Amino acid sequence: SKRMTAALVAKGIFDSIKKAEPGAKIILMGDLNDDPDCASITKGLNAGKNKEMNASNTLFDCMDSLFTSGSGTLSYKDKWNLFDQMIVTKSLCNNQGSGLQFQTACIFNKEMVKEREGKFAGTPWRTFAGTKYLGGYSDHFCVYIFLNCLPKKSTKP
């Protein structure tokens, strides 16, 4: 219920910014502690699963296709989750006008940030396991997106 409340607050902030500045390009990112198919994302934020959004669906979850294909940013009890989200406004997806436009989302899961052996091989190489220092990076893989910068359209004939 707390994640749903947080999602509704974030949606309210998105909506108030969009009301004041309809073309605003906004990115919500972070560890939301929910997968792309969880209610806080699909209902609370009303984030769509594809870039071709309709009027009622003004946010796009960049991570959904990665999650649907089985990728994740953390492993818990032998199950991959994708809690690390990048959610963007429609204005970053419509490829109209100029400026920044969403291209693709990625998970940084290179070998250098993975456990190399044992029961947890292939999962994020943690910094700590309880109080034991392991020397790794994080218990989550990082996520990132690529944005294109579209040039301004010329008004000259």
Image (cartoon, helix red, strand yellow):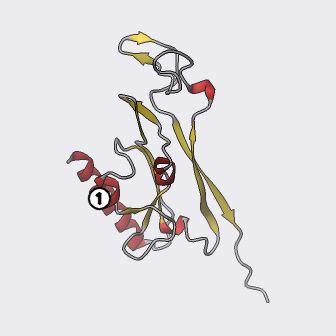
Give the image quarter of residue 148.
Answer: bottom right
> Is 47 on the left or on the right of 105, as rendered?
left
> Is 57 on the left or on the right of 4, as rendered?
right
Q: Residue at x 35, y 67 (%)?
A: 15
* Secondary structure category for the residue under label 1: helix
Q: Mark 1 highlights which residue? A: 44
What percent of the width, then of the height, locates residue 6? 28, 50
Badge 1 local density, few (<14 within 10 Å), some, or many (20+)? some
Q: Residue at x 49, y 64 (%)?
A: 50
Q: Residue at x 46, y 51 (%)?
A: 68
Furthest toward the right, the residue is 157
What percent of the width, then of the height, locates residue 153? 71, 77
Q: Residue at x 56, y 45 (%)?
A: 144
Furthest toward the top, the residue is 132
Q: Is residue 77 above or below residue 132?
A: below
What percent of the width, then of the height, locates residue 30? 43, 44
Badge count = 1
What percent of the width, then of the height, locates residue 54? 43, 75
Q: Is residue 14 above or below residue 138?
A: below
Q: Is residue 17 above or below residue 5?
A: below
Front position in the image: 21 or 98: 98
Furthest toward the bottom, the residue is 157
Q: Which quarter of the rendering shows the C terminus?
A: bottom right
Front position in the image: 33 or 21: 33
Give the image quarter of residue 150.
Answer: bottom right
Front position in the image: 142 or 109: 109
> Is 59 on the left or on the right of 143, as rendered?
left
Q: Amino acid at mark 1?
A: Gly
